[in-house]
Amino acid sequence: MDKGFQLFPEQATRLAAEVDLLYYFLVGLSVFFSLLVFFLIYVFAVRYRRRSEDEAPMQIPGLLKLELAWSIIPFILTVIVFWWGASLYFKAYSAPPGDAMEIYVVGKQWMWYIQHPNGQREINQLHVPVGQAVKLTMTTEDVIHSFYIPAFRIKKDVVPGRYSHLWFEATKTGVYHLFCAEYCGTKHSEMIGSVVVMEPAQFEKWLSGSESGETLAAAGEKKFNQLGCGTCHANVAGARGPSLVGLYGGQVKLADGRTVVADEAYIRESILNPAAKLTAGYNPLMPTFQGQINEAGLLQITAYLKTLK
């Protein structure tokens, strides 16, 4: 990670090279027009300088072709830059491939808490395999943070009360900087970490060394039972709460007539604010679990519900 002075971070994803290309284009464009403007200022200052006290300025007629040129050319360049930047944005923040490895991230003052599906946990370090798409589901327990990996050219704000998603595919093994790019408090500058990109076999070996020996879904099931969720959400007819089997990713009909998708955000809201989106056909009996479960626990329960099919 410490590789001496560098003007630019390494390019460790395919997106990084494409982002840099746009950056170089913008710099080149800015330098070209800056030099052109300074050159023309110099030429006009010399050619049209006042030569005597009684000299009257010469009237210069308009030149339509020139006026069109300095309007149309910048317009075309602006459209190109906009199209290029928008394409990169949608590419960076599009949906990840279906086989992307899912990892959960919780930001808090001043650390990144990371959970892998097999239960492996780490703080301020993120281990991933090279050549594998990785999807991050992120949230925060306190203030706004921003997950930033310069070598990957990706950054995403992590906002309290909602889930943010980010994905990448590392192309080079190595250790890269991980920063919080949002001022989040007095020790914001200490909220740093690293991303360790490993060969797949090496990563599997590292992953198998989970100290807890408990998968994320298993931890979620334990928490689900500790909170007594199964009392009402039993998968039987006449239960006080709706069945959660096959819930994740499906459509839920609400009491107010709306239909919503049961994604991570819906599950989180239903646990912390059950009355916000009441399932049709059920009474508002469920209490809030606000204060009884943290963000990491919410992600564990979500991982468990994903397994109920």
Image (tube, rainbow, N blue to C red):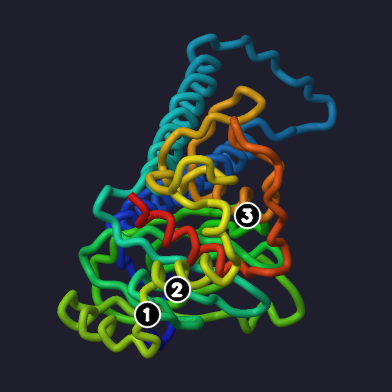
As drawn, 146 above or below 116? above
Measured as percent of width and height from the top left, residue 169 is found at: 29, 60
Image quadrant containing the N terminus: bottom left
Displayed quadrant of residue 171: bottom left
Residue furthest to the left: 201
Residue 214, label in figure: 1
- The residue sitting at 62% across, 54% down in the picture is 271
Give the mark nearer the N terminus: 1 vs 3.
1
Give the amino acid type for the residue marked by disc 1 in the picture. Answer: Glu
Displayed quadrant of residue 210: bottom left
Measured as percent of width and height from the top left, residue 181 is found at: 60, 66
As drawn, 28 above or below 185? above
Neighbours of disc 3 within 10 Å: few (<14), some (14-19), many (20+): some
Measured as percent of width and height from the top left, residue 233 is found at: 52, 51
Residue occupied by mark 2: 219
SS type, badge 1: loop
- Nearest to the observer: residue 268 or residue 241: 241
Neighbours of disc 1 within 10 Å: few (<14), some (14-19), many (20+): some
- The residue sitting at 68% across, 77% down in the picture is 109
Q: CA distance from mark 2 to mark 1?
A: 6 Å
Marks 2/1 in contact by CB < 8 Å: the verdict is: yes
Residue 68, label in figure: none
